[in-house]
Amino acid sequence: MTEEHIHQTHPDIIKRLKRADGHLRSIIEMIESGRSCLDIAQQLHAVEKAIDQAKKTLIQDHIDHCLEEAIGSKPKDQRRSLDEFKEITKYL
C-alpha cells in the first residue's frame, strides 16, 4: 500500500486543476461550435499555464518537504548541492 502524502499546497493544486479541467471542457465546446482558432489558442494557452503552475507548485512542495525530510539535518557544506538543486528548479 502506498503511503499517503498530503501537503499544505495540495488543496490549492486541486482547485487549480479542477478549474483547468472545467476550462478545458469549455475549449472542447468552443471547437465543436466552430469558434475562431485565435480564441481557442488563447484559451488553450491559459489552461496550459494553469497546469504548468500546478506542476511547479507540486515539484517545489515535494522538494521542500519530502526531499528535505529524506536528507535530514546535515551540515551546511553537505547541503550545498540540495540547496542549489532547490534554487535551480525555480526555473522549470
Image (cartoon, grey):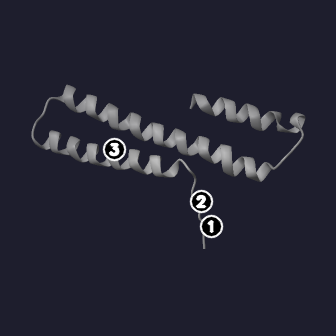
Q: Left or right: 86 with respect to 15?
A: right
Q: Left or right: 8 with respect to 36?
A: right
**Count of numbered circles on the image:** 3
**Alpha-carbon neighbours of circle 2 within 10 Å: few (<14), some, or many (≥20)?**
few
- Residues marked 1 and 2 touching at CB (< 8 Å): yes
Q: Which mark is residue 71?
A: none
Q: Which mark is residue 5?
A: 2
Residue at the spot of label 1: 3
Circle 1 — which element?
Answer: loop
Circle 2 — which element?
Answer: loop
Q: CA distance from mark 1 to mark 2?
A: 6 Å
Q: Is residue 9 above or below residue 79?
A: below
Q: Left or right: 3 with respect to 32?
A: right
Please state which amino acid type lies under the numbered disc 1.
Answer: Glu
- Percent across and percent down for residue 5 are 59, 59
Which residue lies most toward the bottom here?
1
Residue at the spot of label 3: 20
Mark found first going from the N terminus, 1 or 3:
1
Mark found first going from the N terminus, 3 or 2:
2
Please state which amino acid type lies under the numbered disc 3.
Answer: Ala
Q: CA distance from mark 3 to mark 2?
A: 23 Å
Circle 3 — which element?
Answer: helix
**Alpha-carbon neighbours of circle 3 within 10 Å: few (<14), some, or many (≥20)?**
many
